[in-house]
Image (cartoon, rainbow, N blue to C red):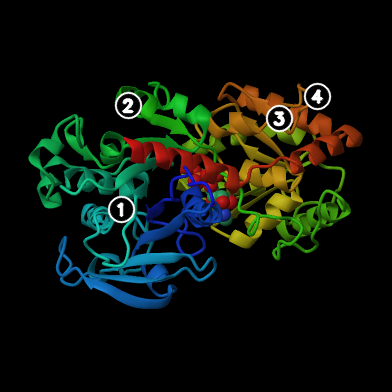
Protein backbone atom coordinates (compact mmCIF):
# COMPACT_ATOMS: atom_id res chain seq x y z
CA UNK A 1 0.00 0.00 0.00
CA UNK A 2 1.30 3.45 -0.84
CA UNK A 3 1.82 5.69 2.20
CA UNK A 4 -0.63 8.59 2.36
CA UNK A 5 0.93 11.75 0.98
CA UNK A 6 1.18 14.75 3.28
CA UNK A 7 1.50 17.09 0.34
CA UNK A 8 -1.35 19.52 -0.12
CA UNK A 9 -3.07 19.53 -3.52
CA UNK A 10 -1.64 22.18 -5.85
CA UNK A 11 -3.73 25.33 -5.65
CA UNK A 12 -6.07 26.78 -8.22
CA UNK A 13 -4.95 30.34 -8.89
CA UNK A 14 -6.75 33.18 -10.65
CA UNK A 15 -4.57 36.07 -11.86
CA UNK A 16 -6.41 39.36 -12.36
CA UNK A 17 -4.55 41.98 -14.40
CA UNK A 18 -5.06 44.68 -17.02
CA UNK A 19 -2.27 43.68 -19.44
CA UNK A 20 -0.84 40.52 -20.96
CA UNK A 21 1.98 40.25 -23.50
CA UNK A 22 1.73 40.24 -26.50
CA UNK A 23 -1.89 41.41 -26.65
CA UNK A 24 -1.75 44.52 -24.45
CA UNK A 25 1.54 45.80 -23.04
CA UNK A 26 2.61 49.10 -21.59
CA UNK A 27 5.51 47.72 -19.53
CA UNK A 28 6.94 44.86 -17.52
CA UNK A 29 3.54 43.98 -15.97
CA UNK A 30 2.43 42.47 -19.29
CA UNK A 31 5.56 40.30 -19.49
CA UNK A 32 4.99 39.02 -15.95
CA UNK A 33 1.31 38.24 -16.51
CA UNK A 34 2.22 36.28 -19.65
CA UNK A 35 5.09 34.30 -18.11
CA UNK A 36 4.22 33.64 -14.46
CA UNK A 37 0.97 31.66 -14.99
CA UNK A 38 2.58 29.11 -17.37
CA UNK A 39 5.47 28.73 -14.88
CA UNK A 40 2.90 28.07 -12.12
CA UNK A 41 1.27 25.48 -14.37
CA UNK A 42 4.64 23.76 -14.87
CA UNK A 43 4.99 23.71 -11.08
CA UNK A 44 1.64 21.93 -10.81
CA UNK A 45 -0.82 24.75 -10.04
CA UNK A 46 -4.04 25.15 -12.00
CA UNK A 47 -3.88 28.70 -13.28
CA UNK A 48 -6.32 30.98 -15.06
CA UNK A 49 -6.31 34.65 -15.97
CA UNK A 50 -9.01 37.30 -15.73
CA UNK A 51 -8.58 40.22 -18.13
CA UNK A 52 -10.67 43.28 -19.11
CA UNK A 53 -12.33 43.03 -22.51
CA UNK A 54 -10.02 45.45 -24.34
CA UNK A 55 -10.40 44.92 -28.11
CA UNK A 56 -6.91 43.37 -28.49
CA UNK A 57 -7.84 40.78 -25.85
CA UNK A 58 -11.48 39.98 -26.69
CA UNK A 59 -10.65 39.72 -30.39
CA UNK A 60 -7.66 37.40 -29.83
CA UNK A 61 -8.87 34.85 -27.29
CA UNK A 62 -9.35 31.47 -28.93
CA UNK A 63 -12.19 28.99 -28.40
CA UNK A 64 -14.36 31.51 -26.62
CA UNK A 65 -17.68 30.73 -25.00
CA UNK A 66 -19.92 32.69 -22.69
CA UNK A 67 -19.70 31.61 -19.05
CA UNK A 68 -22.35 33.92 -17.60
CA UNK A 69 -24.31 37.09 -18.19
CA UNK A 70 -23.46 39.53 -15.45
CA UNK A 71 -26.01 42.09 -16.67
CA UNK A 72 -25.67 45.84 -16.23
CA UNK A 73 -22.75 46.96 -14.04
CA UNK A 74 -20.73 50.15 -13.46
CA UNK A 75 -22.56 52.00 -16.22
CA UNK A 76 -22.30 49.22 -18.82
CA UNK A 77 -25.66 47.96 -20.02
CA UNK A 78 -24.33 44.53 -20.89
CA UNK A 79 -21.50 42.63 -19.21
CA UNK A 80 -20.72 39.05 -20.18
CA UNK A 81 -18.03 36.84 -18.71
CA UNK A 82 -16.44 34.77 -21.45
CA UNK A 83 -13.81 32.06 -21.28
CA UNK A 84 -11.20 31.17 -23.88
CA UNK A 85 -7.49 30.53 -24.31
CA UNK A 86 -4.59 32.88 -24.81
CA UNK A 87 -3.36 32.40 -28.37
CA UNK A 88 0.32 31.80 -27.65
CA UNK A 89 0.40 29.96 -24.32
CA UNK A 90 -3.08 28.33 -24.58
CA UNK A 91 -3.59 29.32 -20.97
CA UNK A 92 -7.27 29.45 -19.94
CA UNK A 93 -8.37 33.06 -19.63
CA UNK A 94 -11.63 34.75 -18.67
CA UNK A 95 -12.39 38.04 -20.32
CA UNK A 96 -14.96 40.60 -19.22
CA UNK A 97 -16.87 41.54 -22.33
CA UNK A 98 -18.28 45.00 -21.59
CA UNK A 99 -18.06 47.01 -24.81
CA UNK A 100 -19.28 50.25 -23.24
CA UNK A 101 -16.31 50.29 -20.83
CA UNK A 102 -13.58 48.53 -22.78
CA UNK A 103 -14.14 48.54 -26.54
CA UNK A 104 -12.38 51.71 -27.69
CA UNK A 105 -9.12 52.80 -29.35
CA UNK A 106 -6.14 54.20 -27.45
CA UNK A 107 -4.37 52.44 -24.60
CA UNK A 108 -5.60 50.43 -21.62
CA UNK A 109 -5.50 53.41 -19.24
CA UNK A 110 -5.36 56.46 -21.50
CA UNK A 111 -6.72 57.69 -24.79
CA UNK A 112 -4.49 58.06 -27.85
CA UNK A 113 -3.35 61.52 -26.73
CA UNK A 114 -2.20 60.25 -23.32
CA UNK A 115 -5.14 61.50 -21.22
CA UNK A 116 -6.53 59.10 -18.58
CA UNK A 117 -9.92 57.64 -19.50
CA UNK A 118 -12.50 59.58 -17.44
CA UNK A 119 -14.28 56.37 -16.43
CA UNK A 120 -11.19 54.45 -15.24
CA UNK A 121 -12.76 53.98 -11.81
CA UNK A 122 -15.73 52.13 -13.31
CA UNK A 123 -13.51 50.22 -15.77
CA UNK A 124 -11.24 48.85 -13.07
CA UNK A 125 -13.93 48.50 -10.42
CA UNK A 126 -15.58 46.05 -12.82
CA UNK A 127 -12.34 44.09 -13.13
CA UNK A 128 -12.02 43.87 -9.34
CA UNK A 129 -15.70 43.06 -8.80
CA UNK A 130 -15.72 40.23 -11.34
CA UNK A 131 -12.45 38.83 -9.95
CA UNK A 132 -13.88 38.68 -6.43
CA UNK A 133 -17.19 37.15 -7.45
CA UNK A 134 -15.47 34.60 -9.70
CA UNK A 135 -13.20 33.78 -6.77
CA UNK A 136 -16.24 33.34 -4.54
CA UNK A 137 -17.58 30.71 -6.94
CA UNK A 138 -20.57 32.77 -8.09
CA UNK A 139 -19.81 33.29 -11.78
CA UNK A 140 -18.48 29.95 -13.08
CA UNK A 141 -20.22 26.86 -11.70
CA UNK A 142 -17.36 24.72 -13.04
CA UNK A 143 -14.39 26.51 -11.47
CA UNK A 144 -13.32 28.69 -8.58
CA UNK A 145 -9.80 29.45 -7.39
CA UNK A 146 -8.23 28.85 -3.99
CA UNK A 147 -6.11 31.98 -4.40
CA UNK A 148 -6.83 35.22 -6.22
CA UNK A 149 -3.64 37.00 -7.30
CA UNK A 150 -4.27 40.63 -8.25
CA UNK A 151 -1.69 42.82 -10.00
CA UNK A 152 -1.17 46.57 -9.53
CA UNK A 153 -3.82 49.21 -8.86
CA UNK A 154 -5.90 48.14 -11.87
CA UNK A 155 -6.88 44.87 -10.20
CA UNK A 156 -6.43 45.94 -6.56
CA UNK A 157 -10.15 46.41 -5.86
CA UNK A 158 -10.51 42.64 -6.17
CA UNK A 159 -8.91 42.37 -2.72
CA UNK A 160 -11.40 44.85 -1.21
CA UNK A 161 -14.41 43.15 -2.81
CA UNK A 162 -13.15 39.81 -1.50
CA UNK A 163 -12.63 41.18 1.98
CA UNK A 164 -16.22 42.46 1.87
CA UNK A 165 -17.58 39.16 0.60
CA UNK A 166 -19.19 36.82 3.12
CA UNK A 167 -17.80 33.60 1.58
CA UNK A 168 -14.18 34.17 2.66
CA UNK A 169 -13.10 30.81 1.19
CA UNK A 170 -10.59 32.17 -1.32
CA UNK A 171 -7.51 34.13 -0.24
CA UNK A 172 -6.01 37.09 -2.03
CA UNK A 173 -2.42 37.98 -2.87
CA UNK A 174 -1.54 41.39 -4.26
CA UNK A 175 1.58 42.27 -6.24
CA UNK A 176 2.91 45.82 -6.55
CA UNK A 177 4.64 46.25 -9.89
CA UNK A 178 4.98 50.03 -9.63
CA UNK A 179 3.96 51.96 -6.53
CA UNK A 180 4.20 55.30 -8.34
CA UNK A 181 0.93 54.54 -10.17
CA UNK A 182 -1.74 54.27 -7.47
CA UNK A 183 -5.07 54.81 -9.25
CA UNK A 184 -6.22 58.08 -7.63
CA UNK A 185 -9.87 59.14 -7.90
CA UNK A 186 -12.25 61.60 -6.20
CA UNK A 187 -13.34 60.48 -2.76
CA UNK A 188 -16.98 61.17 -3.64
CA UNK A 189 -16.80 58.43 -6.28
CA UNK A 190 -16.42 55.83 -3.53
CA UNK A 191 -20.23 55.56 -3.65
CA UNK A 192 -19.97 54.04 -7.15
CA UNK A 193 -18.01 51.06 -5.85
CA UNK A 194 -20.69 49.42 -3.71
CA UNK A 195 -18.23 48.65 -0.92
CA UNK A 196 -19.06 48.93 2.83
CA UNK A 197 -18.82 52.52 4.10
CA UNK A 198 -16.08 51.49 6.54
CA UNK A 199 -13.75 50.87 3.56
CA UNK A 200 -13.46 54.57 2.77
CA UNK A 201 -11.44 55.25 5.95
CA UNK A 202 -7.64 55.79 6.02
CA UNK A 203 -7.45 52.11 7.05
CA UNK A 204 -9.16 51.40 3.70
CA UNK A 205 -9.00 53.22 0.37
CA UNK A 206 -8.78 56.86 1.53
CA UNK A 207 -5.48 58.62 0.80
CA UNK A 208 -5.09 62.32 1.59
CA UNK A 209 -8.68 63.16 0.72
CA UNK A 210 -8.73 60.99 -2.42
CA UNK A 211 -9.22 57.33 -3.22
CA UNK A 212 -6.09 55.32 -4.01
CA UNK A 213 -7.10 51.98 -5.50
CA UNK A 214 -3.59 50.62 -4.85
CA UNK A 215 -4.50 50.76 -1.16
CA UNK A 216 -7.27 48.21 -1.69
CA UNK A 217 -4.54 45.66 -2.43
CA UNK A 218 -2.12 46.87 0.23
CA UNK A 219 -4.75 46.86 3.00
CA UNK A 220 -6.99 43.91 2.18
CA UNK A 221 -4.84 41.23 0.50
CA UNK A 222 -3.67 38.36 2.74
CA UNK A 223 -0.15 38.75 1.41
CA UNK A 224 1.51 41.62 -0.48
CA UNK A 225 4.47 41.14 -2.76
CA UNK A 226 6.62 43.24 -4.98
CA UNK A 227 8.95 42.10 -7.69
CA UNK A 228 12.33 42.01 -5.96
CA UNK A 229 13.56 41.50 -2.38
CA UNK A 230 15.38 44.85 -2.30
CA UNK A 231 12.30 46.74 -3.50
CA UNK A 232 10.20 45.02 -0.79
CA UNK A 233 12.48 46.70 1.78
CA UNK A 234 12.58 49.99 -0.15
CA UNK A 235 8.79 50.50 -0.32
CA UNK A 236 8.65 50.51 3.48
CA UNK A 237 10.75 53.71 3.45
CA UNK A 238 9.67 57.31 2.72
CA UNK A 239 12.17 57.54 -0.15
CA UNK A 240 10.49 54.79 -2.19
CA UNK A 241 7.05 54.52 -0.55
CA UNK A 242 5.22 57.24 -2.54
CA UNK A 243 3.31 58.14 0.63
CA UNK A 244 2.25 54.53 1.21
CA UNK A 245 5.33 53.43 3.16
CA UNK A 246 3.42 53.66 6.46
CA UNK A 247 0.71 51.32 5.14
CA UNK A 248 3.42 48.94 3.96
CA UNK A 249 5.32 49.07 7.25
CA UNK A 250 2.08 48.27 9.08
CA UNK A 251 1.75 45.05 7.08
CA UNK A 252 5.09 43.90 8.52
CA UNK A 253 6.05 40.37 7.49
CA UNK A 254 3.02 40.09 5.16
CA UNK A 255 5.11 42.00 2.57
CA UNK A 256 7.83 40.19 0.64
CA UNK A 257 9.74 40.39 -2.64
CA UNK A 258 9.91 37.75 -5.35
CA UNK A 259 12.22 38.44 -8.25
CA UNK A 260 10.76 38.36 -11.77
CA UNK A 261 12.22 35.94 -14.30
CA UNK A 262 12.99 35.93 -18.00
CA UNK A 263 10.62 34.21 -20.42
CA UNK A 264 13.09 32.06 -22.35
CA UNK A 265 10.53 31.46 -25.10
CA UNK A 266 10.50 35.17 -25.93
CA UNK A 267 13.99 36.23 -24.88
CA UNK A 268 16.71 33.83 -26.01
CA UNK A 269 19.49 34.86 -28.44
CA UNK A 270 19.76 31.28 -29.69
CA UNK A 271 16.34 31.31 -31.34
CA UNK A 272 15.17 34.92 -31.31
CA UNK A 273 13.46 35.46 -34.70
CA UNK A 274 14.05 39.24 -34.55
CA UNK A 275 17.85 38.89 -34.88
CA UNK A 276 19.81 38.82 -38.15
CA UNK A 277 21.92 35.99 -36.69
CA UNK A 278 21.26 33.84 -33.67
CA UNK A 279 24.03 33.29 -31.18
CA UNK A 280 24.81 31.77 -27.81
CA UNK A 281 27.64 31.38 -25.32
CA UNK A 282 29.27 28.76 -27.59
CA UNK A 283 28.95 30.86 -30.75
CA UNK A 284 29.49 34.47 -29.75
CA UNK A 285 30.56 35.70 -33.19
CA UNK A 286 26.90 36.20 -34.14
CA UNK A 287 26.61 38.93 -31.53
CA UNK A 288 29.08 41.08 -33.45
CA UNK A 289 26.99 40.62 -36.60
CA UNK A 290 23.96 41.75 -34.62
CA UNK A 291 25.91 44.85 -33.54
CA UNK A 292 26.91 45.67 -37.14
CA UNK A 293 23.33 45.26 -38.33
CA UNK A 294 22.04 47.44 -35.51
CA UNK A 295 24.57 50.21 -36.22
CA UNK A 296 23.49 50.14 -39.87
CA UNK A 297 19.79 50.14 -39.02
CA UNK A 298 20.17 53.04 -36.54
CA UNK A 299 22.47 55.11 -38.77
CA UNK A 300 25.41 54.78 -36.37
CA UNK A 301 29.00 54.62 -37.62
CA UNK A 302 29.89 51.00 -38.45
CA UNK A 303 32.64 50.72 -35.85
CA UNK A 304 33.06 47.41 -34.03
CA UNK A 305 35.59 48.95 -31.64
CA UNK A 306 33.19 51.67 -30.41
CA UNK A 307 31.28 50.48 -27.33
CA UNK A 308 27.56 50.68 -28.14
CA UNK A 309 25.32 51.63 -25.22
CA UNK A 310 21.61 50.87 -25.61
CA UNK A 311 18.50 51.81 -23.68
CA UNK A 312 14.93 50.48 -24.13
CA UNK A 313 12.47 52.17 -21.85
CA UNK A 314 9.44 54.19 -21.10
CA UNK A 315 10.81 57.72 -21.15
CA UNK A 316 9.98 59.03 -17.70
CA UNK A 317 11.85 60.62 -14.81
CA UNK A 318 11.73 57.21 -13.08
CA UNK A 319 14.04 55.75 -15.70
CA UNK A 320 16.84 58.32 -15.29
CA UNK A 321 16.78 59.39 -18.95
CA UNK A 322 17.54 62.98 -17.89
CA UNK A 323 20.66 61.70 -16.08
CA UNK A 324 21.73 59.97 -19.26
CA UNK A 325 21.29 63.15 -21.29
CA UNK A 326 23.39 65.04 -18.74
CA UNK A 327 26.08 62.33 -18.86
CA UNK A 328 26.22 62.36 -22.67
CA UNK A 329 29.49 64.37 -22.82
CA UNK A 330 31.28 61.62 -20.85
CA UNK A 331 29.78 58.92 -23.05
CA UNK A 332 30.81 60.66 -26.24
CA UNK A 333 34.21 61.59 -24.81
CA UNK A 334 34.92 57.89 -24.25
CA UNK A 335 34.36 57.19 -27.96
CA UNK A 336 31.13 55.28 -27.31
CA UNK A 337 27.84 55.32 -29.22
CA UNK A 338 24.29 55.56 -27.86
CA UNK A 339 21.02 54.16 -29.18
CA UNK A 340 17.75 54.82 -27.33
CA UNK A 341 14.37 53.23 -28.06
CA UNK A 342 11.49 54.61 -26.07
CA UNK A 343 8.44 56.79 -25.76
CA UNK A 344 6.74 58.78 -23.04
CA UNK A 345 7.54 62.22 -21.70
CA UNK A 346 7.43 64.64 -24.65
CA UNK A 347 10.32 66.79 -23.32
CA UNK A 348 12.59 63.73 -22.95
CA UNK A 349 11.62 62.52 -26.44
CA UNK A 350 12.53 65.93 -27.88
CA UNK A 351 15.81 66.15 -25.93
CA UNK A 352 16.86 62.73 -27.22
CA UNK A 353 16.04 63.70 -30.78
CA UNK A 354 18.02 66.92 -30.38
CA UNK A 355 21.02 64.93 -29.09
CA UNK A 356 20.76 62.57 -32.06
CA UNK A 357 20.72 65.52 -34.51
CA UNK A 358 23.68 67.10 -32.76
CA UNK A 359 25.77 63.92 -32.93
CA UNK A 360 24.91 62.08 -36.15
CA UNK A 361 26.52 58.64 -36.37
CA UNK A 362 27.21 58.69 -32.63
CA UNK A 363 23.78 59.05 -31.03
CA UNK A 364 20.49 57.69 -32.37
CA UNK A 365 16.98 57.87 -30.93
CA UNK A 366 13.98 55.85 -32.04
CA UNK A 367 10.87 57.34 -30.50
CA UNK A 368 8.02 54.85 -30.33
CA UNK A 369 7.23 51.35 -29.22
CA UNK A 370 8.83 48.58 -31.28
CA UNK A 371 9.03 45.06 -29.85
CA UNK A 372 11.30 43.63 -32.60
CA UNK A 373 13.71 46.59 -32.43
CA UNK A 374 13.87 46.11 -28.64
CA UNK A 375 15.17 42.58 -29.29
CA UNK A 376 17.67 43.75 -31.91
CA UNK A 377 18.85 46.56 -29.63
CA UNK A 378 19.39 44.28 -26.66
CA UNK A 379 21.30 41.78 -28.85
CA UNK A 380 23.37 44.30 -30.79
CA UNK A 381 24.42 46.65 -27.99
CA UNK A 382 27.49 46.01 -25.85
CA UNK A 383 25.94 47.56 -22.75
CA UNK A 384 22.27 47.91 -21.76
CA UNK A 385 21.62 51.02 -19.65
CA UNK A 386 19.14 51.10 -16.76
CA UNK A 387 19.99 54.27 -14.77
CA UNK A 388 16.65 54.30 -12.93
CA UNK A 389 15.80 56.45 -9.91
CA UNK A 390 13.72 53.54 -8.67
CA UNK A 391 13.19 50.14 -10.27
CA UNK A 392 10.89 47.52 -8.69
CA UNK A 393 12.58 44.73 -10.68
CA UNK A 394 13.56 45.85 -14.16
CA UNK A 395 13.47 43.44 -17.04
CA UNK A 396 15.80 44.89 -19.67
CA UNK A 397 18.88 44.26 -17.49
CA UNK A 398 17.78 40.61 -17.20
CA UNK A 399 17.35 40.40 -20.98
CA UNK A 400 20.79 42.06 -21.35
CA UNK A 401 22.41 39.42 -19.12
CA UNK A 402 20.84 36.66 -21.18
CA UNK A 403 22.08 38.24 -24.43
CA UNK A 404 25.64 38.90 -23.19
CA UNK A 405 24.92 42.65 -23.21
CA UNK A 406 26.35 43.85 -19.92
CA UNK A 407 23.95 45.90 -17.81
CA UNK A 408 24.97 49.29 -16.45
CA UNK A 409 22.50 50.00 -13.67
CA UNK A 410 21.85 52.11 -10.61
CA UNK A 411 21.99 50.22 -7.30
CA UNK A 412 18.22 50.25 -6.58
CA UNK A 413 15.44 47.66 -6.36
CA UNK A 414 15.73 44.65 -8.60
CA UNK A 415 18.75 46.15 -10.36
CA UNK A 416 20.72 45.81 -7.10
CA UNK A 417 19.53 42.20 -6.80
CA UNK A 418 20.53 41.10 -10.29
CA UNK A 419 23.74 42.84 -11.41
CA UNK A 420 27.20 42.51 -9.81
CA UNK A 421 29.64 45.34 -10.40
CA UNK A 422 32.88 44.89 -12.33
CA UNK A 423 34.77 45.81 -9.16
CA UNK A 424 34.07 42.27 -7.92
CA UNK A 425 36.18 40.67 -10.64
CA UNK A 426 35.38 37.06 -9.75
CA UNK A 427 31.59 37.52 -9.89
CA UNK A 428 31.07 40.61 -12.07
CA UNK A 429 28.19 40.72 -14.57
CA UNK A 430 27.98 44.46 -15.26
CA UNK A 431 28.45 47.98 -13.90
CA UNK A 432 26.65 49.45 -10.90
CA UNK A 433 26.58 53.05 -9.64
CA UNK A 434 25.00 54.58 -6.56
CA UNK A 435 24.05 58.26 -6.64
CA UNK A 436 21.30 59.41 -9.03
CA UNK A 437 23.59 62.11 -10.43
CA UNK A 438 25.09 62.77 -13.88
CA UNK A 439 28.57 62.53 -12.29
CA UNK A 440 28.03 59.05 -10.85
CA UNK A 441 26.49 57.86 -14.12
CA UNK A 442 29.34 59.45 -16.13
CA UNK A 443 31.85 57.60 -13.96
CA UNK A 444 30.13 54.29 -14.60
CA UNK A 445 29.92 54.98 -18.36
CA UNK A 446 33.65 55.70 -18.44
CA UNK A 447 34.40 52.53 -16.46
CA UNK A 448 32.31 50.45 -18.87
CA UNK A 449 33.87 52.04 -21.98
CA UNK A 450 37.32 51.40 -20.50
CA UNK A 451 36.51 47.78 -19.66
CA UNK A 452 35.20 47.23 -23.21
CA UNK A 453 38.73 47.88 -24.48
CA UNK A 454 39.97 44.78 -22.60
CA UNK A 455 38.37 42.08 -24.75
CA UNK A 456 39.38 39.05 -22.70
CA UNK A 457 38.03 40.26 -19.38
CA UNK A 458 34.96 41.60 -21.21
CA UNK A 459 34.25 38.21 -22.75
CA UNK A 460 34.63 36.53 -19.35
CA UNK A 461 31.99 38.89 -17.97
CA UNK A 462 29.73 38.28 -20.97
CA UNK A 463 29.89 34.53 -20.53
CA UNK A 464 29.23 34.84 -16.80
CA UNK A 465 26.27 37.13 -17.51
CA UNK A 466 24.83 34.67 -20.04
CA UNK A 467 25.13 31.82 -17.52
CA UNK A 468 22.96 33.60 -14.91
CA UNK A 469 19.67 31.83 -14.31
CA UNK A 470 16.75 34.17 -13.69
CA UNK A 471 14.09 31.63 -14.47
CA UNK A 472 10.37 31.95 -13.95
CA UNK A 473 10.43 28.46 -12.45
CA UNK A 474 12.30 29.76 -9.39
CA UNK A 475 9.79 32.61 -9.07
CA UNK A 476 6.84 30.20 -9.46
CA UNK A 477 8.15 28.02 -6.62
CA UNK A 478 8.33 31.09 -4.36
CA UNK A 479 4.79 32.16 -5.30
CA UNK A 480 3.46 28.66 -4.61
CA UNK A 481 5.00 28.77 -1.12
CA UNK A 482 3.40 32.17 -0.60
CA UNK A 483 -0.03 30.96 -1.78
CA UNK A 484 0.21 28.14 0.77
CA UNK A 485 0.96 30.68 3.53
CA UNK A 486 -1.89 32.92 2.39
CA UNK A 487 -4.30 29.97 2.39
CA UNK A 488 -3.16 28.97 5.88
CA UNK A 489 -4.14 32.36 7.29
P1 LIG B 1 8.49 49.10 -16.71
O1 LIG B 1 7.53 48.01 -16.44
O2 LIG B 1 8.73 50.03 -15.55
O3 LIG B 1 8.19 49.86 -17.96
P2 LIG B 1 10.44 46.95 -17.08
O4 LIG B 1 11.91 46.97 -17.32
O5 LIG B 1 9.94 46.12 -15.95
O6 LIG B 1 9.96 48.46 -16.95
O7 LIG B 1 9.70 46.41 -18.39
C1 LIG B 1 9.71 47.13 -19.59
C2 LIG B 1 9.31 46.21 -20.72
O8 LIG B 1 8.81 47.00 -21.78
C3 LIG B 1 10.48 45.42 -21.28
O9 LIG B 1 9.99 44.21 -21.82
C4 LIG B 1 11.00 46.35 -22.39
O10 LIG B 1 11.70 45.66 -23.39
C5 LIG B 1 9.67 46.91 -22.91
N1 LIG B 1 9.76 48.22 -23.55
C6 LIG B 1 9.82 49.43 -22.93
N2 LIG B 1 9.82 50.43 -23.84
C7 LIG B 1 9.77 49.84 -25.06
C8 LIG B 1 9.74 50.34 -26.40
N3 LIG B 1 9.76 51.63 -26.66
N4 LIG B 1 9.68 49.45 -27.42
C9 LIG B 1 9.65 48.12 -27.15
N5 LIG B 1 9.67 47.59 -25.92
C10 LIG B 1 9.72 48.44 -24.88
Depth check: give the residue in front, 381 or 192: 192
Mark 1, residues whose alpha carbon is within 10 Å: few (<14), some, or many (≥20)?
few
Q: Are marks 4 and 3 in contact (CB under 8 Å)?
A: no
Badge number at residue 431: 3
Q: Is residue 180 left or right of residue 419?
A: left
Give the residue number, with chain letter if any, for mark 4: 425
In the rendered picture of this protein, how many numbered marks are placed on residues?
Answer: 4
Q: Is residue 457 left or right of residue 110?
A: right
Query: What's the distance in space between the residues labelled 4 and 3, CA to CA?
Result: 11 Å
Q: Is residue 17 left or right of residue 68?
A: right
Q: Is residue 217 above or below residue 21?
A: above
Residue 219 placement (x, y as % from top left): 26, 34
Mark 1 or mark 4, earlier in chain: 1
Badge number at residue 251: 2
Query: What's the distance in space between the residues labelled 1 and 3, CA to CA?
Result: 37 Å
- The residue drawn where x is 26% and y is 42% is 213
- As drawn, the residue found furthest toward the front would be 1
Query: What's the distance in space between the residues labelled 2 and 3, CA to CA?
Result: 34 Å
Amino acid sequence: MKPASNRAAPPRVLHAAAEVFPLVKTGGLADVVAALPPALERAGAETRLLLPGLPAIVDALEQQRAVCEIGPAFGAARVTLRRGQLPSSHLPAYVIDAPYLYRRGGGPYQDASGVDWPDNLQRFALLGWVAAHLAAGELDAAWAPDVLHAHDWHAALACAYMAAHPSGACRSVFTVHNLAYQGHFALADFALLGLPASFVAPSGLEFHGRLALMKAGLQFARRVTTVSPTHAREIATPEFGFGLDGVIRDRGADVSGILNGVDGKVWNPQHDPALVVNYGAEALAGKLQCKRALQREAGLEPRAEAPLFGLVSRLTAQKGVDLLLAALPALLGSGAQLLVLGSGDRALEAALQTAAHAHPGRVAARIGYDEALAHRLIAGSDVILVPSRFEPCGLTQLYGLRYGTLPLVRRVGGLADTVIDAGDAARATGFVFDAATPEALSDALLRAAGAFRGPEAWQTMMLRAMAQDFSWDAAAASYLALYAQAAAG
